[in-house]
Amino acid sequence: MVLNYDPSSLCELRRDKMMNKNHRARALITNQGPTQFSKKEWCKLGTAAIFIKLRQKLQGHWNYYGVSGNYDRLRKYYYQVLIMTYKWLNRRSQRKSCNWQGFQEMLKHFRILRPRIVTYWN
């Protein structure tokens, strides 16, 4: 059995993989298509994509759960999310991606909202 090696098909395969990776990252940011990512895929996403998605998720959480009397729980949730995000940002490689001060600066840069009350009970 003779295998035909075609270098152009290898380049095409690489291009398809790259396009698929970009498509999945765009799907994560825009909520289109599949957003189930493995740990390996999540680690390859850029920091900006992670913070944009974090801002969207927290905004939706504040809009849904931001009623009067619920601020303490929202604050606890916010700090738990920050701790988990910091942990996972630093797990993406063998080196630390950032320290806590740098992480706080990234929160300001990407305008991650603090918890807030959106509606009040009558």
Image (cartoon, grey):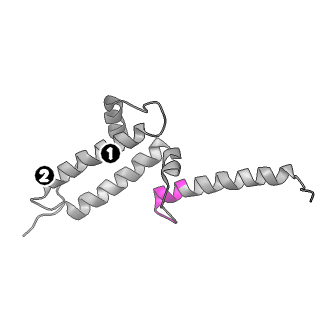
Note whether residue 51 is visible.
Answer: yes
Mark 1 or 2: in front is 1
- Image: 105 above or below 6: above
* Residue 84's disc number: 1
Q: Is residue 26 magenta?
A: yes
Rendering coords of residue 82 (x, y %)? 29, 44
* Category of crowding for the residue at label 1, using alpha-carbon neighbours closer than 10 angstroms: few (below 14), some (14–19), many (at least 20): few
Residue for point 55% across, 57% down: 24
SS at circle 2: helix
Note whether residue 113 is visible.
Answer: no
Residue for point 46% across, 48% down: 49
Q: Is residue 120 left or right of residue 12?
A: left
Amino acid tagged 1: Met
Amino acid tagged 2: Asp
On the image, numbered disc 2 is attached to which residue?
Answer: 72
Quarter of the image with the N terminus in it: bottom right
* Category of crowding for the residue at label 2, using alpha-carbon neighbours closer than 10 angstroms: few (below 14), some (14–19), many (at least 20): few
SS at circle 1: helix
Q: Residue pushed farthest right?
A: 2
Residue range highlighted in magenta: 25-33
